[in-house]
């Protein structure tokens, strides 16, 4: 009996110790997978940052994504932290960081760590390839545990993809996000969610809370990295970036179809032909079967992007299918982000209880050391104008390729044939713009009290648009009331990615598109005023005249029609010649 | 010869017609499980009571098992299939002692779990948990999936508010946080998608007052579910009368003689091995302690007997025994009953 009893106790002990005690050899593949995971995590850990306010207050997480220190975190982590922050990394060093751009709706902020150009940077993955059950791990600074800044790792699986999380009383909205059971807790906010290869697939920012207080209960949410990729250049612009609205509200009917239930008549999508009760089939190339899916897609794109939209309509018993490309409008007005009274903080309605948001850093005094001060430039309407100038000058290099136009203020004459074999002659002058197209002549006078008109009619204001072009070439930024870098987008929804520069003059404005790869000027859009379709000019090829270049082929579109395609054969530029007649005489 | 050539041609044709299967085309275990899960929307939505829960289809003609709760109070609840189809669900029966309710929806040819093929698992088994927690999934969006391991298979001592709950059967306790709004009625499966258990209600441990993540093994409820479906179910007042555990095999069927079962939990030591038996052939010896059957911990002679009793003819199964300071693993086959 004694022997049984002692054996019994040993047996019980063994059971407790069992995982280590199993005599069977571990499959080498398992050991290899384990070793691989350890290596992936070790590499990933080097890219993770603990984010604090300038005085060390607050506390959240982030991840460095470029060797020169650009890093992503949550908007709610740095909200109120001011311009400069302190960021601790796994090497134990506390780096200075400066704010770059914010996305209050998407809860993303870009910051830049300073002092190195060889930061360990995390590669970005493709979050659309994630499937339920895929292994993922979160890294960050939960409960501010790591005093040496080495991040905490928590492991789990993808619990859901394309999740929609309601704004619940704030403008902060999680659309198309990743749900995971990897433990995400207060302090993890802003930190990366990695896939098994150690690529960033999301930024952790929100958790479901219920009855246990502010701790993880198995449901955390990460902003998908694919959404952030859409906004990446926008965030680098040093601005407050905005999400989009279609100008239409959809709802599900009895049969589960997603129908347009409300529509603004002054919205671009109305002008493209969408009407009440139309059945939305697909949006941005993804099929739409629920209102959540529609909101998911709308939520991941910046305002101003153009997206394909397919819808069905029943006409006299027949089903018509329409495919349009629609430009997204701003979700918020500028004043919602930048209130006139400076003491009111940017968008900060009370935060919902069920949000797993971290405490923002205390509003700390801005005591900027001199060596950091150069990384911040204050300007109304911008988060940090320093970065806008940086990106603007980078994007504008495409203009330099066209040659030096400064001082070429005389008359310009551009001649050639249109695609329909009509002769054309365009005359640029300071006093006005003229076009001779076949037998017809068109004129847009310029001057302080002259109205901008749709001339030639149906072009969306081509002549006024070309005046913006001339001013941009000859005088650059200085001549416009506003002139800034916006971000990037695929040209016309389907083309190559282009950098966007916005220029404003009086009531009109224009957007300038530069191919991100080649730097080449791909075209521009011009609005006589905001509530109309723009004049869209797309450029290809170059023509030379005495060391200066102009685009060779100008495709002009307005609304749903191509107005004309101009093939430039010759152009003649006159320098600022006082004697020359500045009238745009044709 | 012609025949052979034709044969080859046919084979070649087959190759062309059947493109290589990719990950997209083959349903993963998770997708297979998701197809059998439904979201349930009913009463609640105030006072901390949630108006949604989960269920799983166990018969192709629309029978759904779920957890018995306030969500089912209305005459008709909304059942949303994994493909987004919305159906009316009616409660056709319930066994509160098992926390089990059966719903019927008007549909045919639904993907379903065969309750007879449900698996059992031991402590340490990796599991997946599926459920409509926090209502994050709507329409055709698949419900949340959590990973975890079975931390214990034990008796439930739980309460809801001030009330002790009636269910006293064994439950799986898991380390993933399944105790969340809407998760009740969801399922626990093995990583390869075999049904293990139904996730229970939001209950607290009666002793420590902590929330417990538990699930009721399918084999505890399968018979009742089928009886409710066929209309044969009568509530039993005495839980002892529940169907006795199967006794398909005894230890001696393999040539193992255990020490006398004199304690509540007598450790399963081998007293002797019958000469010429499978046990002798595989080298089992007296004083070996039987620890695991098929990965499931057996803590007593009774548990060993229960585990062997569930075996079917031809089953291959694994035994782990402790001998001195070593663990030895052997594999056995359940013999044909006539040959015993």
Image (cartoon, grey):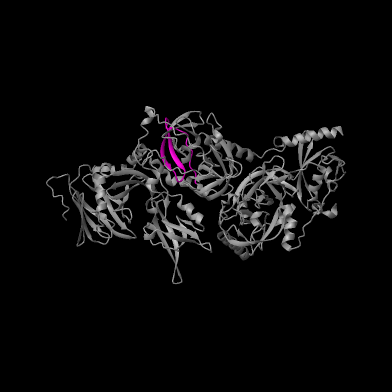
Q: Nearer the viewer, residue A88 or B21?
A: A88
B24 horizontally vs A504: left or right: right
Q: Nearer the viewer, residue A540 or B212?
A: B212
**Could you say where residue B184 lies in the image, as x and y percent from the top left?**
65, 51
- Placement of the C terminus of chain A among the 4 image quadrants: bottom left
Count of labels in the image: 0
Residue A189 falls left or right of residue A437: right
For residue A135, say whether it is visible: yes
What's the residue at 53%, 29% (across, down)?
A: A148
* x and y, in percent, of residue A165 in the image: 52, 49
Residue A427 magenta-highlighted: no
For image coordinates 44% across by 60% down, the residue present is A262
Quarter of image, res A402: top left
Region rendered in magenta? A97-126
Residue A498 higher or lower than A249, as above or below: above
**Residue reaching furthest left?**
A579
């Amino acid at each position: 009996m004694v022997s049984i009893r002692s054996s019994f106790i040993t047996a019980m002990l063994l059971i407790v110790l069992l995982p280590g005690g199993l005599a069977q050899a571990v499959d080498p593949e398992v050991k290899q997978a384990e070793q691989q995971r350890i290596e992936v995590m070790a590499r990933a850990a080097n890219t993770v940052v603990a984010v604090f306010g300038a005085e060390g207050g607050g506390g959240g997480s982030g991840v460095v994504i470029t060797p020169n220190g650009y890093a992503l975190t949550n908007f709610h982590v740095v909200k109120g932290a001011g311009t400069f922050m302190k960021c601790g990394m796994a090497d134990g060093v506390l780096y200075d960081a400066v704010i770059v751009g914010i996305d209050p709706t998407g809860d993303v902020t870009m910051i830049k760590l300073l002092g190195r150009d060889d930061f360990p940077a995390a590669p970005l993955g493709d979050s659309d390839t994630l499937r339920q059950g895929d292994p993922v791990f979160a890294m960050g600074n939960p409960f501010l545990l790591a005093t040496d800044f080495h991040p905490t790792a928590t492991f789990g699986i993808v619990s859901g993809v394309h999740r929609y999380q309601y704004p619940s009383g704030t403008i902060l909205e999680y659309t198309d996000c990743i749900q995971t059971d990897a433990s995400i807790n207060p302090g993890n906010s802003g930190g990366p969610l990695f896939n098994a290869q150690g690529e960033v697939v999301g930024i952790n920012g929100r958790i479901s809370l219920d009855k246990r207080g502010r701790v993880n209960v198995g449901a955390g949410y990460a902003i998908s990295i694919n959404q952030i990729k859409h906004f990446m250049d926008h965030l680098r612009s040093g601005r407050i970036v905005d999400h989009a609205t279609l100008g239409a509200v959809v709802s599900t009917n009895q049969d589960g179809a997603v129908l347009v239930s409300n529509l603004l008549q002054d919205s671009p999508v109305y002008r493209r032909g969408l009407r009440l009760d139309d059945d939305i089939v697909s949006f941005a190339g993804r099929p739409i079967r629920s209102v959540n899916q529609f909101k998911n897609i709308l939520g991941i794109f910046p305002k101003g992007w153009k997206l394909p939209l397919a819808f069905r309509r029943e006409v006299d018993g027949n089903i018509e299918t329409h495919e349009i490309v629609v430009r997204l409008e701003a979700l918020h007005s500028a004043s919602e982000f930048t209130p006139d009274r400076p003491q009111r903080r940017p968008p900060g309605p009370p935060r919902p209880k069920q949000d797993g948001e971290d405490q923002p850093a205390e509003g700390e005094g801005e005591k900027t050391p001199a060596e950091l001060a150069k990384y911040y430039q204050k300007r109304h309407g911008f988060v940090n104008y320093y970065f806008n100038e940086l990106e603007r000058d980078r994007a504008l290099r495409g203009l330099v390729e066209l040659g030096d136009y400064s001082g070429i203020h005389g008359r310009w004459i551009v001649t050639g044939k249109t695609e329909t074999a009509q002769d054309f002659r365009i005359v640029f002058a300071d006093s006005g713009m003229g076009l001779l197209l076949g037998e017809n002549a068109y004129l847009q006078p310029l001057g302080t009290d002259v109205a901008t008109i749709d001339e030639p009619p149906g072009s969306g204001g081509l002549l006024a648009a070309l005046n913006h072009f001339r001013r941009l070439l000859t005088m650059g930024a200085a001549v416009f009331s506003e002139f800034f870098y916006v971000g990037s987008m695929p040209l016309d929804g389907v083309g190559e990615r282009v950098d966007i520069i916005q220029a404003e003059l009086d009531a009109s404005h224009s957007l300038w598109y530069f191919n991100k790869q080649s730097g080449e000027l791909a075209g521009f859009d011009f609005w006589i005023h905001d509530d109309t379709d723009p004049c869209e000019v797309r450029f290809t090829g170059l023509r030379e005249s005495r060391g200066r270049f102009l685009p060779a082929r100008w495709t002009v579109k307005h609304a749903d029609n191509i107005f004309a395609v101009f093939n430039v054969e010759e152009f003649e530029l006159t320098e600022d010649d006082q004697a020359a007649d500045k009238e745009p005489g044709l | 010869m012609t025949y052979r050539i034709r044969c080859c041609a046919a084979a070649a044709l087959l190759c062309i017609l059947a493109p290589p299967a990719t990950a997209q085309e083959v349903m993963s275990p998770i997708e297979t499980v998701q197809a059998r899960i439904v979201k349930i929307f009913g009463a609640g939505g105030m006072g901390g009571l949630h108006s949604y829960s989960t269920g799983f289809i166990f018969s192709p003609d629309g029978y759904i098992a779920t957890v018995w709760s306030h969500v089912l109070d209305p005459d008709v609840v909304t059942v949303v299939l994994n493909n987004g189809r919305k159906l009316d669900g009616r409660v056709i029966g319930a066994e509160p002692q098992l926390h089990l309710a059966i719903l019927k929806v008007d549909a045919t040819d639904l993907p379903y779990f065969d309750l007879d093929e449900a698996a059992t698992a031991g402590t340490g088994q990796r599991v997946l948990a599926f459920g409509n927690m926090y209502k994050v999934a709507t329409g055709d969006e698949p419900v949340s999936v959590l990973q975890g391991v079975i931390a214990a298979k034990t008796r439930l001592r739980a309460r809801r508010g001030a009330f002790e709950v009636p269910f006293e059967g064994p439950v799986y306790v898991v380390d993933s946080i399944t105790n969340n709004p809407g998760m009740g009625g969801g399922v626990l499966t093995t990583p390869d998608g075999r049904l293990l258990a139904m996730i229970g209600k939001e209950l607290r441990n009666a002793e420590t007052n902590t929330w417990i993540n538990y699930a009721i093994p399918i084999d505890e409820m399968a018979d009742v579910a089928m009886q409710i479906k066929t209309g044969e179910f009568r509530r039993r007042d005495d839980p002892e009368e529940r169907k006795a555990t199967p006794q398909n095999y005894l230890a001696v069927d393999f040539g193992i003689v255990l020490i006398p079962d004199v304690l509540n939990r007598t450790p399963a030591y081998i007293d002797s091995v019958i000469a010429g038996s499978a046990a002798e052939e595989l080298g089992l010896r007296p004083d070996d302690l039987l620890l695991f059957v098929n990965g499931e911990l057996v803590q007593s002679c009774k548990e060993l007997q229960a585990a062997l009793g569930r075996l079917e003819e031809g089953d291959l199964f694994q035994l782990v025994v402790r001998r001195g300071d070593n663990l030895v693993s052997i594999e056995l086959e359940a013999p044909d009953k006539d040959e015993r």
